[in-house]
Amino acid sequence: MPLLEVKNLDVSFGLRSGEIKALRNINFTLERGERLGLVGESGAGKSVLGFSILNLIAKPGRISAGEIYFEGRNLAELSPEELRSVRGNRISMIFQDPMMTLNPVLTIGQQMIECLQAHRKINKDNARTIAVQKLKQVQIPSPETRIDQYPHELSGGMRQRVVIAIGLLMDPDIIIADEPTTALDVTIQAEIMELMVELCERNNVALILITHDLGVVSQVTQKALVMYAGRVIEQGPTREIINDAQHPYTQGLMNALPQMAIPGQRLNQIRGAMPGLQSIPTGCAFNPRCDYVVEACTKQLPGYTVSGNCQVACHMVADMKKAQQAPEEVSS
Ligand SMILES: Nc1ncnc2c1ncn2[C@@H]1O[C@H](COP(=O)(O)OP(=O)(O)OP(=O)(O)O)[C@@H](O)[C@H]1O
Ligand SMILES: [Mg+2]
């Protein structure tokens, strides 16, 4: 049984203008200790998916179809108390902005101790010992004194380390990290990401990493979901996706990576922009930006084609694969 299973998940927002689907038919599994990347442009639905796993979609949003199973149990069928315990103890979330997690008027220690005492029967001294231990794990220097400081007394990088320490506080099974390093200096980003991966590995914690950056996904995760306008357009083992991207959108993301650029030349950004959810084109949502578009792409939503160990939602994927394998035949 997988640790987490998301099955045919739809999330909708009821707006005055009507209901819009922010997520359509999302399917994936996550094993214990596995690292999964959710990647795509702004507005693709990555954060909505992260929140829906915690059943934290705020109104007017709701899970309108599908199920989420944690250790085989349907989250929708848990009592409010059980759900709170899953959220507090088993699955934790780390955000881009440390101040979404940290309370500016409490010291780091007060917040960590409060958090521990809310979820465990534990006295203050023991809670403090655990908190110091976690701060040590995230390599905060002199944690015994740092613990009594307020968030504003720490640098951005240190604050994000504290947030990771809080994320690890309850020894969760899954951490959902939503752009955890985007707000940091580039030099610190890699350091924090490395630390997070090391801690997940050491504690056998599964990670769902939400990011715009396919480069980070390739370094950190074993599995990836590429999202576009609320749908997964390609998913599979990260290495396969990186080495042999099948969907033209994934290929576009690959070509836009700075490490793929030829020095002195502009980056190959994908032309155009992702549509808003209210104006998704018929057929394949990517069709106005795609170089391989054929008639079917503008008429019919592509189903998933299996390619190697990946699933790809593209009408052209079989043809492109053939063209790759036998270029002479196709051109003749
Ligand atoms: N509270 C809301 N009310 C209505 N629509 C919403 C709400 N939250 C999200 N959406 C819709 O869901 C879409 C996806 O949002 P989401 O925040 O998941 O994008 P994202 O992929 O995380 O983008 P980013 O990379 O910018 O964080 C948005 O474009 C928006 O249309
Ligand atoms: Mg987001």
Image (cartoon, grey):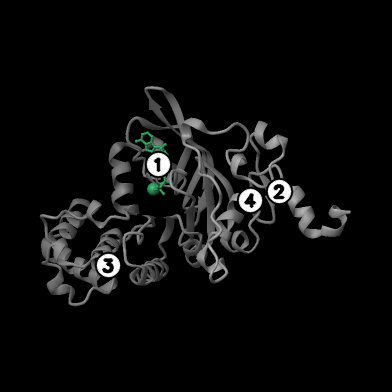
- Amino acid under label 3? Gly
Secondary structure under tag 3 reads helix
Mark 2 close to ligand 1, CB under 8 Å: no
Quarter-wise, where is residue 237 in the image? bottom right
Q: Earlier in the sequence, mark 1 or mark 3?
A: 1
Residue at figure coordinates x 75%, y 48% from the top left: 318
Percent across and percent down for residue 239 are 59, 64
- Left or right of 289? Residue 23 is left
How many residues crowd around disc 1 within 10 Å: few (fewer than 14), some, or many (20 or more)? many
The residue mark sitting in front, 4 or 1, is: 4
Using the rendered image of the protein, determine whether residue 45 is visible from the camera's viewpoint: yes
Position of 47 relative to 180 (above/below): above
What number of labels is visible?
4
- Separation of disc 4 and disc 1 at Cα? 28 Å
Q: Mark 2: give few (<14), some (14-19) or many (20+) Cα within 10 Å.
A: some
Q: Nearer the viewer, mark 3 or mark 4?
A: 4
In primary-sequence order, the first of circles 3 and 2 is: 3
Quick one: SS at disc 2?
A: helix
Which residue is label 3 attached to?
Answer: 157
Please rate how many residues cluster around mark 3, counting C-alpha atoms within 10 Å: few if below 14, some from 14 to 19, many from 20.
some
Residue 147 left/right relative to 26: left
Q: Residues within 10 Å of mark 4 (few under 14, many from 20)?
A: many
Give the labeled residue for mark 1: 52
What's the amino acid at mark 2? Val
